[in-house]
Image: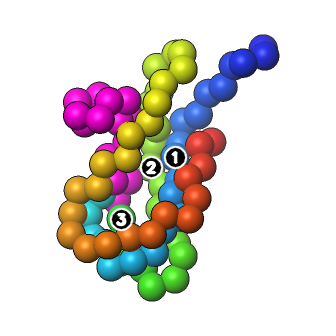
Amino acid sequence: TKGTFSASRISATLRGDFDGSIQVCLDEDGEQTVADIAVGPANDWQVFSAPLTLPDGVHPLFLIPNGKGNLDLQTLTLK
């Protein structure tokens, strides 16, 4: 159907010395979490992924880092 999209997994291509997780939320307060991507330090671009649970409809996604260090985001993929 036109305009219909569903995803069950989110992947992020990252690098940096960040160690922790990236909380994927429907709100900027982090109260409606739809995925939690565990991330570890990576000198080169590396793909980190997690299961994703999205409700029906169109929603913004907020990425909230929880951990220490810095990271660079190259791509974000929903599948």
Q: Of label 1 and label 3, which has the lower sequence position?
A: 1
Question: Element at badge 2?
Answer: strand
The amino acid type of the residue labelled 1 equals Ile
- Kindly tell me whether residue 36 is visible in this rendering: no
Q: Is residue 77 left or right of residue 59?
A: right
The residue indicated by pointer 2 is: 50
Which numbered disc covers residue 39?
3
Vertical position of residue 56 compared to residue 38: above or below = above
The amino acid type of the residue labelled 2 equals Ala
Residue 68: x and y, percent? 21, 69
Residue 27: x and y, percent? 32, 30
In the rendered structure, are the residues bearing label 2 and label 1 in contact, judged by CB atoms less than 8 Å apart? yes
- x 34%, y 59%: residue: 38
Q: How is the image coloured?
A: rainbow
- Kindly tell me whether residue 20 is visible in this rendering: yes
Name the quadrant of the N terminus: top right
The amino acid type of the residue labelled 3 equals Val
Name the quadrant of the C terminus: top right
The residue indicated by pointer 1 is: 10
Residue 65: x and y, percent? 29, 55
- Chain part drawn in magenta: 22-38
- x 37%, y 30%: residue: 26
Question: Which of the 4 image quarters holds residue 75?
Answer: bottom right
Q: Of label 2 and label 1, which has the lower sequence position?
A: 1
